[in-house]
Structures are given as structure tokens and as C-alpha cells.
Amino acid sequence: MATVAKPAIAPMIPRIAPREDLNPFRIAQIQFDMAAEFLKLDPGLRQILRTPKRILEVSLPTKMDNGQVKVLTGYRVQHNVARGPGKGGIRYHPNVTLDEVKALAAWMTWKTAVVNVPFGGAKGGVICDPKRMSKAELERMTRRFASEILPLIGPDQDIPAPDVYTDSQTMAWIMDTYSMMVGHTVPGVVTGKPISVGGSVGRAEATARGLVFVVEEACKLKKISLRGATVAIQGFGNAGATAARLFVEKKAKVIALSDTRGGVTNSRGIDPIKAIRYKERSGTVVGMPGASRISNDDLITMKCDILVPAALENVITLTNAEAIKARIVAEAANGPTTPHADEILARRGITVLPDILANSGGVTVSYFEWVQNQEGLLWDTEEVNLRLQKIMIRAFHEMVDTMRKHHVPPRAGAMILAVGRVAEATLVRGLFP
Ligand code: NAD
């Protein structure tokens, strides 16, 4: 991969970091400021692009199965819609904060721009503990959330999708609630739906498939053979478990997996299908036969060719970046690497395939799903995967060209590419009123 010019990003990150700032929105702004500096954006434009356009906070009175009412808090943030409707997932997690949702919305703006699909960036979240809620409670909470954010969402306005601890069923409830309120069926209001109500083939595995396409390209540049390469994956959900399966299809060797309860490792390789079946039965990969126990921290720093963080933010930080032994870090998760860790990994010659490119396969096939809904089309798996491959490979090489032009690491290259596109759209539209 292109060599990294350390001085290019170093001045942008605060030099003294006795304790690293792990606020995701401030991290997203540091990443933006670096790209804005390279692009020499004017101060007014910087203010527009580093601030969310709209924030909606909602209270969700939800009847629990025991008859009590719990009032939960939810957010929908639209970061930027200069290039098209807002687009971004909805996360259910006890640790959701407004700043996390703002960061995730900003990353969506840059992600849709990197792959050049005609969307802006948005995100939603509800502070709740979905693992401790019944399906009926989740349905009631989701429908109330959908009705509360109804003024913001719509197929031409803002289109939610699944994220951590939400899935195709969640999207079906949102689609149904929206459709009931407007009086007719509107499949294009969400993506990541079940196929039976307008979902696209290939969407469920698109994030991981897109990631594997860009890892393949990076391996070619770094002269690493994916066949036989060792892979460690943190997070065994939609993104992580599918990535494990697809890496094994490419003859790579998955040597470690993990989830919230911990991880498992086997240097001879773990069969992802067996791990998926084991997790379905027991709720975790921990304890699966033929693999020994490992902690999440040990997984991140273990010796491997490709490390895939596929859980949450801030797992590669100042504390462990010097100890990372992977040659490529492929960010399936959003925001897993802090700016200080980025700087350390760049200095150490470790290629970080940034979230806004590496996990953008999900939003790319969401775009395909939305196009099919809007146009009444039905594409087959081959067509979806071929279109995805074309977009991912094009975006990867556009990022590499930008890296070479500015002598910067991959995240900076992807951000400069993305911010440049959104800035151009904003400037050409002009300032209202
Ligand atoms: P998911 O809910 O399907 O899976 C999350 C997985 O992470 C679970 O296996 C969970 O056990 C594990 N996990 C959670 N906290 C953990 C921790 N502290 N340590 C280790 N493992 C932990 O979610 P997902 O959709 O696979 O999303 C994972 C990441 O990928 C998120 O950062 C998400 O924003 C990002 N992402 C997902 C998509 C998508 O299409 N699903 C698209 C782009 C980005």
C-alpha cells in the first residue's frame, strides 16, 4: 500500500493526551478537520459540514410485559443531506448517547460520499437493553419510536436501516408503522427489510462482502495472499459472523472470534458455520468445542494478518495500538480506532482500511434496495453482488489515488475524497435563503 507520510496528520491531533478523549463525536470532528485542512475549505463551509443539520430527541413510553410503563429515550440525527436523503442505521444499546449518534450520522455522510451513492448521512439510536426485552416489548418500543421520528423519515427524506442489535424484523415494524400512518405501503422508507416486504437479496451479507472486496484489493497492493492469511474478528454479529464465513470461502484462516462474553482461538482455524450454530444454541461463541478461550483484549493484539474489529467504537486506542500485530486492520465496526491509535498504526506501517470505506458495502446495497423499491425492480443476487463489487473496488482505488496525491494514510485519503464531494455539493447548491 502507498507509504504513509506521518507529518501530514500529526499536527491535526492534539499532541498531549494524558487521557485519550474517546468521545465519538469529537473524534469524528478531528477526522473531519484534518480533511478540511487538506482541502483548504473556507471557515463557514467547515462549520456547516462539521455540525449536524437536525437532531430529534424523543421519549418512548413503552408498556413492558409486566404491565409497567418505561419511558425510554431515542434519537434521530441527520448530519448532512446535501447529496440526497439522509441514510443510516438505528442502534439499540444501553450505552447509546447523543454524541455517539451524532458521530455515527457524520460517518454516514462521509461513507455515502466515499462510495458515491446519492444519499446524505443520518443515524438513530435508542437507549435500551434489547437483550433483556421480549420480542413484544421490542415491537412496541420500535413502533413508538417510528411514530415519533415520523416527521423526519421517508423514502425521499431519511431512510433508516439496521445497526447494532436491530435487524430485518425491526425494519419491518418501522416500515409497517410508517405505512399505516400514511395510509399506503411504502417499502422505500427503510432498507435491510425482510425480502418478503421489499428487502433486497444480498443486503444481509453486504457489509461483510464489501469488506472482503476491499481487503482483497489491499492484499494485492501489500502483496499478501488472502489464501492462507490469518484473520481475527472481534464481534460475531451481522458484520463479523458473515465476514468470517466469506473469508473462509476465500481460503483465509479465521483464527479468533469474539462477542460480548469473550473470545475463542485456534491457530489451525475455526469453522465459522460451526461457530454460528454454536452461538445460535448458547448465545455466545465462548465454549465452542475445538477452540480455546481468549479475552477480547488479547484478540485485538494477537498475531494475525488481518484484524477485523466488528463490534463497537474505541477498541484500538493509545493503550493497545503499539501492541497490534496485524498487517491490515479492516474496520467493519464504525469508529473502532481512535485518532492517536491511527497515528501509531500509520507510523508502524499497519494499513487501516477505514470504516467509511471498509463497511460501506451495507449502505451500498441499501441504496440498491431503495432503487429497487422506488422503481419496482427485482435484481438477483448475482446482479447485486456484481454491482457491489464494482462500487467497492472503484471507491478503494479512488481512496488510494487520493492517498498518493496527498501523501496520507487510508483514513485521511477516504475522508479527503468524501469531504471534497460533500463540500462540492454544498457549494454548488448555495446557501439558503
Ligand atoms: P450486531 O448487533 O449484529 O452484532 C454485534 C456483535 O458485536 C455481537 O456479536 C456482540 O456480541 C458483539 N459485541 C458487542 N459489544 C461487544 C464488545 N464490547 N466486545 C466484543 N464484542 C461485542 O451488529 P452489526 O450490525 O454486526 O454491527 C457491528 C458493527 O458494524 C457496528 O459498529 C456497526 O455500526 C457496524 N456496521 C454494521 C453494518 C450492518 O450492515 N449491519 C453496516 C456498517 C457498519
Image (cartoon, helix red, strand yellow):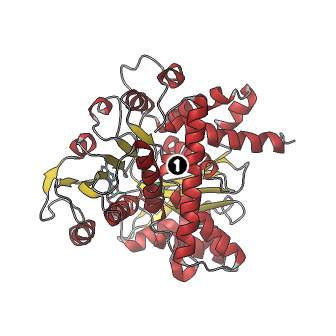
Residue 356 located left or right of residue 155: left
Q: Is residue 331 visible?
A: no
Identity of the residue drawn at 53% across and 54% down: 360
Identity of the residue drawn at 43% across and 40% down: 352
Establish if 24 lies above or below 236.
above
Establish if 292 lies above or below 343.
below
Splitting the image into 4 quarters, where does residue 404 fall?
Answer: top right
Q: Residue furthest top?
A: 16
Residue 37: horizontal and vertical position, in percent?
64, 26
Disc 1 residue: CB within 8 Å of ligand 1: no
Q: Secondary structure at mark 1?
A: helix
Instruction: Report the front residue among 266 and 85.
Output: 266
Q: Residue furthest bottom?
A: 196
Establish if 284 lies above or below 198.
above
Identity of the residue drawn at 52% across and 32% down: 26
Residue 13 located left or right of residue 159: left
Quadrant of ligand 1: it is bottom left
Q: Residues within 10 Å of mark 1 (few under 14, many from 20)?
A: many
Instruction: Name the residue tied to disc 1.
Output: 357
Looking at the picture, which amino acid does disc 1 mark?
A: Leu
Q: Quadrant of the C terminus?
A: top right
Instruction: Report the front residue among 61 and 317.
Output: 317
Residue 313: horizontal and vertical position, in percent?
41, 43
Q: Is residue 158 visible?
A: yes
Instruction: Report the front residue among 173 and 305.
Output: 305
Establish if 424 lies above or below 87.
above
